[in-house]
Image: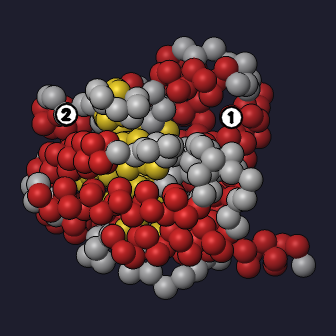
């Protein structure tokens, strides 16, 4: 375990004005995204699309890192170098999603736990040799009648902690992602309660497995109203509730916190981040979005070479807006542009 390297990586991931692009969609998720714009989900199309994103000129000003899917770690950039090396040359940290997806937990209402711990130590060593400097593991917590159960929260917290310890041992910074889904008709109050219970259990498990808080990044969902609840909490309420939960549960020793977008609109994800980053917090806050960074680019691209420039422009714009939001400067910039 190289503590100096872990510290350097974690600090770089949340460096001022930058955030992380999640481009680690599994082949199945990628299929869904591609089919929404009429693109066939072949290995070559996935490579082409991701290269479009990574080769966007100047995007490195706003991206500290990219989370890759295993397939992409082994693919080549347009200049012939392996993608992790290509990113590193641009000053962007290559990361990798190492979990193997979700399975149902027996004797629950189809609550999920994340698989992928078997053989992880060996895989982690290989990822380090391939240039990956951080990793991601996503756990999913669903809100509904009588759920999440203690069983679900506990099982996921322990898997996250075992994963995080394995990462640190291999000198790879663990990004731990306990995502509380926004699907459902629950209130923002209920989301806040579930986030608190989830994060408490997660950090208790980190302590139980001797995970070093100084070398850890949390990737969290925001406390928003359930998607189908008629009352949607506004930007300030989301920011207040989210930051309150984080202050209660996340140690100040941690180098930073990043957010997923979780199906929020692009603008909402940016506005929420901006409001939170404008508060005085013990840790830097930034983005680690997939959909909220990629959606406009994907829609502009539609698999056509002639659309690459427009897609890159759209991607650059969202990255820039979120870079500003991570410093609490997005709203002021919008007002300036409107004036
Ligand atoms: P979204 O921002 O689309 O929620 O994706 C982030 C992510 O990495 C989910 O695991």
Relative side of 78 to 95, left or right:
right
Residue visible at 48% across and 22% down in the picture:
27
Q: Residue furthest bottom?
A: 280
In depth, the one of 109 and 265 nearer the eye is 109
Relative side of 35 to 105, left or right:
right
Which mark, by number, is residue 117?
2
| Label 1 near ligand 1 (CB < 8 Å) | no
The crowding category of the residue bearing disc 1, from other C-alpha atoms within 10 Å (few below 14, some 14 to 19, many at least 20), is many
- What secondary structure is found at the residue carrying circle 1? helix
Which mark, by number, is residue 298?
1
Which mark, by number, is residue 328?
none
> Does residue 57 lie above or below 275 as drawn?
above
Relative side of 113 to 288, left or right:
left
Percent across and percent down for residue 284 are 43, 73
Q: Quadrant of the N terminus?
A: bottom left
Percent across and percent down for residue 227 are 66, 47
Q: Is residue 133 visible?
A: no
Percent across and percent down for residue 186 are 59, 52
Residue visible at 65% across and 61% down in the picture:
270
- What secondary structure is found at the residue carrying circle 2? loop
Percent across and percent down for residue 167 are 19, 47
The crowding category of the residue bearing disc 2, from other C-alpha atoms within 10 Å (few below 14, some 14 to 19, many at least 20), is some
Residue visible at 67% across and 20% down in the picture:
35
Q: Is residue 335 visible?
A: yes
In depth, the one of 125 and 200 nearer the eye is 200
Depth check, mark 1 against mark 2: the one in front is 2
């Amino acid at each position: 375990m190289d503590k100096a390297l872990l510290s350097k990586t974690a600090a770089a991931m949340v460096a001022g004005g930058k955030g992380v692009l999640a481009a680690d969609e599994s082949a199945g998720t990628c299929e869904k995204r591609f089919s929404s714009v009429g693109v066939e989900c072949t290995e070559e199309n996935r490579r082409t699309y991701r290269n479009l994103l990574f080769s966007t000129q100047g995007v490195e000003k706003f991206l500290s890192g990219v989370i890759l899917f295993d397939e992409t770690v082994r693919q080549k950039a347009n200049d012939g170098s392996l993608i992790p090396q290509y990113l590193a040359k641009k000053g962007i940290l290559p990361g990798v999603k190492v979990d193997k997806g979700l399975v149902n937990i027996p004797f629950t209402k189809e609550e999920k736990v994340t698989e992928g711990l078997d053989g992880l130590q060996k895989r982690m060593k290989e990822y380090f040799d391939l240039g990956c400097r951080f990793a991601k593991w996503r756990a999913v917590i669903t809100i509904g009648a009588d759920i999440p159960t203690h069983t679900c929260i506990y099982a996921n917290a322990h898997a996250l902690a075992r994963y995080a310890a394995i990462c640190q041992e291999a000198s790879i910074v663990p990004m731990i992602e306990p995502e509380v889904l926004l699907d459902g008709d629950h209130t923002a109050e209920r989301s806040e309660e579930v986030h608190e219970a989830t994060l408490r259990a997660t950090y208790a498990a980190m302590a139980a497995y001797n995970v070093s808080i100084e070398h850890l990044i949390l990737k969290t969902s925001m406390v928003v109203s359930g998607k189908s609840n008629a009352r949607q909490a506004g930007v300030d309420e989301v920011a207040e509730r989210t930051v309150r939960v984080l202050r209660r549960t996340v140690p100040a020793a941690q180098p930073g916190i990043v957010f997923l977008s979780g199906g929020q609109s692009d603008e909402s994800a940016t506005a929420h981040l901006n409001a939170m980053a404008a508060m005085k917090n013990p840790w830097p806050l930034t983005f680690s979005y997939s959909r909220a960074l990629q959606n406009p680019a994907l829609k502009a691209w539609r698999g056509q070479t002639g659309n690459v420039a427009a897609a890159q422009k759209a991607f650059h714009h969202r990255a820039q807006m979120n870079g500003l939001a991570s410093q609490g400067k997005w709203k002021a910039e919008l007002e300036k542009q409107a004036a």
